Image (spheres, rainbow, N blue to C red):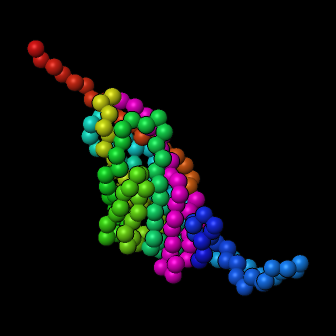
Amino acid sequence: NTNSLYGNPSMIKIQNISEPGIIMSFEIEYNPIIPATINILDGSGIVNDFGTIPVHIDNNIVIEHLSFQLDFYNSSPIIITDIIPGDRTYFDSISIVDNKIIFINPIIDIGSEHAFDIQLFNGSGVSDIVDISINQISAFSTDSIEIAMIVTGECNYQIIEEEQYFSV
């Protein structure tokens, strides 16, 4: 695998570029494309408390590197606090920086449907609906083969306000 001019992984490798001239030559190689889909489903949580968003991945090769960015729209104050693995997902730890999630030594076994949940803390005291999408995905298999992750949807995350009772 190679990197693009912008430092992102590229599925194209250009090498053996000839000296500059009227006629130039080079070799181009395409890395295999292995598709997989990732989908975040609608989730919910209570004001000033935790909530979750389920994530489904449909993959036919084991994923051993995964990172992605969550983008929040109409955002109430929300903080990503944890990743809760599903039955086919294992990892040593995670790194969360500015809504970017990086799995450390993950293994996501072949399968479809539920892979893990994203746990959020809702810093809002009022109900709200937040649109959330996945962006900047990077995924690789055991042999460092890049996996073309296709995002199949966005989610609506509902912050639910509980009734409050006051006595005087």
Count of numbered badges drawn on the protein: 0
Residue for point 52% across, 60% down: 137
Quarter of the rendering occupied by the N terminus: bottom right
Side of 165 relative to 39 (left or right): left
Up-down relation of residue 5 to residue 2 (above or below) = above
Residue for point 47% across, 35% down: 74
Q: Would residue 33 be seen by someone viewing this image from the given angle?
A: no
The span picked out in magenta is: 127-150
Residue for point 39% across, 35% down: 76
Question: Does the magenta run of residues contain 144?
Answer: yes
Side of 119 relative to 68 (left or right): left
Quarter of the rendering occupied by the C terminus: top left
Closer to us: 87 or 38: 38
User: Which x, y percent locates residue 96?
Assistant: 36, 57
In the rendered image, the residue lying farthest to the left is 168
Closer to us: 128 or 5: 5
User: Which x, y percent locates residue 131?
Assistant: 48, 40
In the rendered image, the residue lying farthest to the right is 22
Q: Would residue 78 be seen by someone viewing this image from the given angle?
A: yes
Up-down relation of residue 137 to residue 74 (above or below) = below
Residue for point 40% across, 52% down: 98
Closer to us: 134 or 115: 134
User: Which x, y percent locates residue 87?
Assistant: 35, 65
Up-down relation of residue 21 to residue 139 (above or below) = below
Residue 92 image-quadrant placement: bottom left
Closer to us: 108 or 25: 25
Question: Does the magenta run of residues contain 55?
Answer: no
The chief SS type of the magenta part is strand
